[in-house]
Amino acid sequence: MNSQTPSSSSPLTISVIVPVKNGGSGFRKCLLALTQAMSPSNELIVVADGDTDGSWRVAEEFGAKVIRIPVSQGPARARNLGAREAQGDVLFFIDADVVPPPSAIPQVEAAFRHDPQLAALFGSYDEDPAETNFLSQYKNLSHHYVHQISNEEASTFWAGCGAIRRQIFMEFGGFDESYKKPCIEDIELGYRLKQAGYRIRLSKDLQVKHLKRWGIISMTKSDFFDRALPWTELILRDRQFVNDLNLRLSSRLSVILTYSLLLALIGGFWWPGLFAIACVLILSLLILNAPIYRFFLQKRGLWFMIQTLPWHWFYYFYSGLAFAIGLGRSLLFRHQSRKPGFSAPSRGIPDTAEPPENR
């Protein structure tokens, strides 16, 4: 353990970092909850990422240290700028559209104080999202469920409600700023931490309320272009097929079953016998995903659970499509890289991290 790492008996200071771009009324709720939970030894840093609604003024009202970026450069850049100004032992990243409970900051401080070898931790959304429309409820409950059933010894990181020791964060160069919009910059950082042998914990009792309203276009666009496609490229780059979170074996099998069902339904118009196979595939999907469907049933009732089925299978459809596109791009890139004069693009992250034995 590095001599600069505080011992389990030493007090830890927390720097809360919130990137915001046009946070609206939800941002005020986020800041109110944070300031009520903070002690005098903590600090609140808000990075206004090209906002045009005066979110930075709201942050000043709450006594936050404000950093302004004139033109939006994405949350990865915003969080990195906040981290460079932070003085705390631990950096606690919070999204501007979540409301943390009063216990959040004490939970984070206690976790790092009691476990000096812990490099990072993250929580999840709670099971009571603020928006009441179906897609917002479905999307947030899905996120909550996946995190609650996943391994506590995590294989990645989530910056919506995630904390990391400042020294380790700076050694690793922070988030990859090549991600210019909300994407998988936190997952990518988590992969680098794990590859270097650092420990990340999924703290299941650290839960925040999500305020975001999801619609058909916003949800599909975010899932496909900002999550599934770049995550596929990251998986193929680092060969990280971990049986956890959204990459569980059951999810991969569900993708195969979903595409088989689609082909059986299409082919059934020419060979009606395929409709019988389609029924078997539907039953298989129901059985394989029975735990999450029971969860939806318990939390929101039968009709809600029934409504989730086509959306859940649609999720598997575009996740599989993203993987196919990502694999095709990877093979094409590999072919081009063999050509004379080709140079691979830089990741833009300095490789300055110490190995675990030097901590």
Image: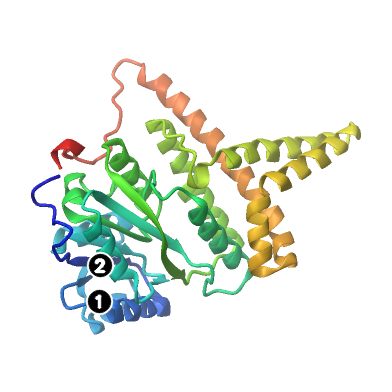
Q: Nearer the viewer, residue 130 or 301?
A: 301
Percent of width and height locating residue 160: 38, 61
Are there few (<14), some (14-19), or many (20+) residues within 10 Å of tag 2?
many
Q: Nearer the viewer, residue 205 or 300?
A: 205
Are there few (<14), some (14-19), or many (20+) residues within 10 Å of tag 1?
some
The residue at 59%/67% (across/down) is 137
Q: Amino acid at mark 2?
A: Val
> What residue occupies the far left of the structure in this picture?
3
Q: Amino acid at mark 1?
A: Met
The residue at 40%/60% (across/down) is 123
Query: Which residue is identified by label 1?
Result: 38
Percent of width and height locating residue 216: 61, 61
What is the CA distance from the residue labelled 1 to the residue labelled 2? 9 Å
Query: Which residue is identified by label 2?
Result: 16
Where residue 292 sits, quadrant-wise, is: bottom right
Dot 1 and dot 2 residues touching (CB under 8 Å): yes
Q: Is residue 253 above or below residue 60?
A: above
